[in-house]
Every structure is written in structure tokens, then in C-alpha cells.
Image (cartoon, helix red, strand yellow):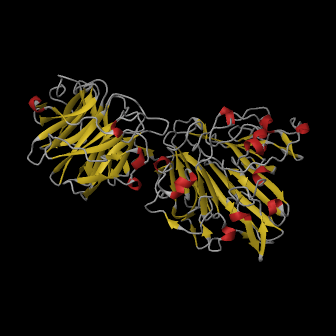
Amino acid sequence: MKRIATFCAPLLLSLATAAQTSTYRNPVIDKSAPDHTVLRANDLTLSGLNPSHFELNIEDKHTHLYTLRNSKGMEVCFTNFGARIVSIMVPDRNGKMQDVVLGYDNIAQYADREHFGSDFGAAIGRYANRINQGRITIDGKTIQLPQNNYGHCLHGGPTGWQYKVYDGHQLNDSTLQMSLFSPDGDNGFPGNVNATVTYTLTSDNSIDIRYEATSSKKTFINMTNHSYFNLNGDPSHDCENLMLYINADRYTPADTTYMTTGEELGVAGTPMDFRCLTPLIRNINNKHFDMTRNAGGFDHNWCLNTWRKGKGNDKLIAAALYSPTTGIRMDVYTDEPGIQVYTGNFLDASFTAKHGYRYPRHSAVCLETQHYPDSPNKPQWPSTLLEPGKKYTSHCRYHFSIGKEEQIAYADPTIVRAGDKYYLTGTSNNTPQGFTVLESNDLKNWTPAGRLLTEGKQVYGDKGFWAPQLYTNGKTWQLAYTANEQVAVAEASSLIGPYTQKSVKPVDASAKNIDPFVFTDDDGKSYLYHVRFDNGNYIWVAAYDKSTGSIDSNTLKRCLDNTEAWENTSDYPSVPVMEGPTVIKHKGKYYLLYSANHFMSRDYAVGYAVADSPLGPWKKPVNNRIIHRSTVGENGSGHGDVFYDKNDNAFYVYHVHNSSNAVSPRLTRIIPLHFTPTNDGYDRITVKMNEVIVPIKQ
């Protein structure tokens, strides 16, 4: 719900006629039924809506609820008040039907502009988005429109078409047409306008929307649909975990009043770059970038690559939204030059909506296909001028499917490279317990490569398998891992296993120890870094023999103490936690990367220390935290491993929280490491948020 100025004009409701219209029957066509049964008006929809709650008389026009269903069970409900989409029911990856749009479950709230003013699901007109200072010029004459949003005219004014009652006509069992007459002077706009919005529910689970309009005078028209999508199926929480794709190299920046400046800037290297599926959470709360800081998220127009030489190609994907939670993907197709992405920045859970839900900030994403904001005052952009005798047309299609992409849910991940391929494994909730592995050629797209290790008599442990690491011992591959809160090591002749133990035992049963990392120095000596418990979790190291699988207890020593403020924040109080060690050698120095804070904390993060020996002592540089939600944009970022790509560039693979509301299943991320020389004799390690890679399992 974009912030709209409220007006105290009386509600346009005739309470005397608020009773149900006795002659109306909700025209619900169920194509899955053999006889295309028309459901009764008092039958609830699949989305739980009661049609009788949408029967009202508003300015002598009746409002209704209309429902379309297809043979696959998808259901879409509409009301002719604002030609709005009220609910969309689509199947998730498990076949469960989910309502993926926000809205109300009664017409009274939709109609009450003073208390519940919204653009939920509406067909916006006459002019979607903002017009600067509410002024347009036609044939040299300046026309003043209402200024209902930061001094600008938003969505056609305070009583735009989202608050008008359309005439609804069901053309067939899959198509609903809404028509509206807008008189000359409506919210200041010239011309008598006849507009139609035609919704078609297709057999492939698409909502096809076609807009048409004609005018008796020159006027400006820019229509769109303003549905608020939450593909997670739970609008009571934010949906910052959703992944967004926008087929656009440029965007139109806006000022602090959300007005476009007239520029077109490149997205490359900025938080506006969604040219591959990117989690919203990475930058939606970015306070360092003007656009997201000013808007409190995203509320901007992108210049679509699908628009070329004055024409849009609605056969190409313009944008996409994907939920890792449900697997639901929505692809957007349009012939428009732009798309406004709005992330529900003004939602605040202050009112009760559909089925009792309260919608918090960032609980939905709007993908509004349209011409650029303020096009009437920006002659360099595609025009929205409609002349008498001409017809305005616009097309948008929302296609729902189960995404073939799936974010990888390995916690405590590790990657090794063998030849031209990368192999990724980590902690997961697989049954039986153990470790699976994925392979990739490019770090972005991954496919299953089998099981590395499976619980059983051939390996140590029967519970708590986590934090694996792969490395070589001569011609043999070894897998260090945690099970039963003990470090164990298994072997295999092949990188992809299966890994077994000749002698089924942990490395050191004298005390609990977890999170192994084996480092082999240039001289061939090896060291086992791991975590032990002593009023907290601390990282220890000991000389290690890879052939016998044993440590030299005489060399056992603690590496680090919990000394930095970031290592134990108040976000999730706990005993000190230092874990997830990884050691590399760089320019003759040893770098120990570690994670601190409880893994449940949003502030779980990665830091580093430097030493001249693999046994220490270790020195923490000033400001040694490198990976944190403030630097990579996602909560709970940590516990990973360093690896090198084909060009010997260093990367860190780590996990993040599933979303801002849930920790598990944790998701895998990859980011390049940058080393910058200092005057202290070691290199500073940094990362760049816009370089985060989201690996996808195909």
C-alpha cells in the first residue's frame, strides 16, 4: 500500500442498500467439473472468500465477487470495485494451494478510503504512478491535477479508478471483462474515457491482462495492475527472502519524493541489479544506497530490455519472482517499456486484512508493468498521450509455475575444485544422515553428484552429522566431519565417495570436539583446527597426522579468545561462540577465518586473525569482521570455507539464515575475497555485497 493522503470526504457507500442483491448469483465457473457447474453465491471460494461479503451498493452501482478456475485447480477471485484481483490460489511444490496476493475479504474495507485506502490488486488509472507536481501540459495548456502524494499526483488522484465500480461481464468460462466510463474532468484529466480491463485465466496457470481505452480528447493514459504478491503463502511475515529477476540494464532514479529525475542509470554494480535471481534481503534494507535508503526498500522503475525501437516483446520474460519457501515462481511478460517494483515499504501491520492477517513491512512485492513515471513531463521517454480516434492498449501476463531453480540449503558449506569442476557439500537434514554433494562448472548452477557419506557401521556416528571438509592425502580423498559431537575422518578413492573408515572411531575421544578443518602447510605438515567446549565454544589447533588420523596432544592449544564486541552481541545472548575455522596461507602469512556469535543470531558473522605460524599466536586486525549482515545483506552469515577458482581467485562459501523470520533451513552463499596490502605486514580481507553469488540447484 503506497502512502496515499487520506481525505475526510464521506464514504461513497449507500448503507440503505448494503444488503445483498437478491437477483445476483456469483458467476463462478468450475472448469474442472464435468458440467462446468455454476457455484451458488453463498459457497466459499477455494481461497475462503464469501461472495456475499462483496455485495454492496456504491454510488448506485452493485459490487460483486467473480471467480475463475481452470482445469489445474488454479483459482482467481476478482471484484468489480476497482477491477481488483482479490485472491490467487496456486499450487506450491508440494501441491498445496497457496493464496499469493494480499487484500481484504470484504468489500467494505476496499471501499473505505479513509480508514483502509489501498491499491491492493487494483487496475490503476487514469495514470499509474506519479506525475510531477500534478501538472500535465496538452497543446500548450497546463492542467493541474490533484496532488495526493508528496506534492505529486499518484495513481490518477485520490479517487482514481481503483475506487470506481466497473461493469463486470464474464465473457466465457475463463475470461472476465471489466469496463469503466470516466467522464471529462475526472480528477482533472481531460476527455471522456472508455476503458476496459480483460482478465483471462489460461490453462497453463497464467493470468493474462489486457487494457484498452479510448478518449474524446487528448489525454494521458497509463494503466497497470497493482497486486501485492507474497509467494511464501504467509503474509503475516515479510517476504524479504523472495528472489527477484528483472530483465533490465537501466533504471530511472527517483528523489526523496519518489519522483523520477529524468535520468536513466545503469544497474551494474548497484543494488538495482537483478539481472539474475537475487534475494531481496540482500539490499532491501540497504541504508548506504540512496534509492533504497530513501524508499525504505524498492519503489522504482526499471527500463525493460524487452522494449526495443518503440515496441515491447511480450514473449520474453520481463521479470520473475521466486519463493524458496514454496517453490512458486511467477514470470511477468509485458509489452510495456517499464516495470515499477514496490516492496510494501509502507505496510506496517496496523490493520486487519484478509482472513485476519496483518501485513507487516516488506510482506509483498508489486510488479507493475507500465510506462515510466512522469512520462507526460519527460519527452525523452516513451509517450503516454492518447488522442481521439486512437486506442490505448497494454498487455501483461503473470505466469505461475513451480520453479526448477532451488536455492541450496547447505549449512557449514565447503567447496573444493578438481580440474574444471567444483564440488559443494555441507550440513543438511537428509535422511539417512550423512553428506550429499553437488557439482558445478560455474559456481552458479549446481547438479546432484551423489552421496559422499552415509551413516552406518562403516563410519563413526549415528547423530548430528555436520561441518564436513574435503581434502587429499596423497592419492586418497579424505572427509573430515562432526558426528556425535566428535570429529571423525573417513576416506575414499574418489572425491565423490563413498567415504568409509577402516577403523570406525573419532579422531580424539578424550573430549568433545566439532567443526574440523585440516590445513596442510607447504612443508607437508598438517594441522587440525576444531572447536572444543570450555564455558563456550573456542577454536583449538593441534598437529595432525593424516595417515593415522591422530593429533599430537602435546601441540594442542587454543587459538583465539572472545575479545571483539561483534563476537558476542546481545541479539541472541549465549556463552561465547567461536567456531567454523578455516586456514589459508597468503604471501607467507597464515589467515584464520572464523565465525562468532550464536548461529541463531542475526549477527552471526565471519572475522579473521593473522599469524606467522599455523600454531599461532594469532592477532586480530582492527575491524576484523568481514562477513556480516551489514556487508552481505543477509542475517546469520557465517561458518564456511575458503576455496580458489580456476584463475586462483579466493572465494568464501558460507551459510545465511533462511529469511529474516526463520533460521533454518540455512541457505548457501558464495562471495569473492579481496586482499589489500597494509602497512602492518599483512593483507586486509574485504568483501563486496554486490558480488554475492546465490548458487542454484537445477
Q: Residue 152 at what x, y percent from top left?
A: 70, 60
> Farthest residue in the bottom direction?
140
Q: Can you tell which quarter of the image residue 409 is in? A: top left
Q: Residue 485 at what x, y percent from top left?
A: 27, 26
| Residue at figure coordinates x 63%, y 48% from the top left | 203
**Residue 81, above or below 318:** above
Q: Is residue 125 visible?
A: yes
Q: Residue 493 at what x, y percent from top left?
A: 17, 40
**Residue 601, above or below 438:** above
Foreground pick, 409 / 399: 409
Foreground pick, 329 / 140: 140
> Farthest residue in the right direction?
16
- Say how many tags the image has: 0
Q: Residue 92 at what x, y percent from top left?
A: 55, 39
| Residue at figure coordinates x 78%, y 40% from the top left | 107
Q: On the rendered structure, is 563 left or right of 510?
A: right
Foreground pick, 618 / 297: 618
Q: On the rendered structure, is 225 left or right of 432?
A: right
**Residue 30, above or below 393:** above
Q: On the rendered structure, is 387 left or right of 238?
A: right
Q: Is residue 452 visible?
A: no
Q: Can you tell which quarter of the image residue 356 is in? A: top right
Q: Can you tell which quarter of the image residue 496 is in? A: top left
| Residue at figure coordinates x 14%, y 52% from the top left | 588
Foreground pick, 201 / 275: 275
| Residue at figure coordinates x 46%, y 56% from the top left | 276
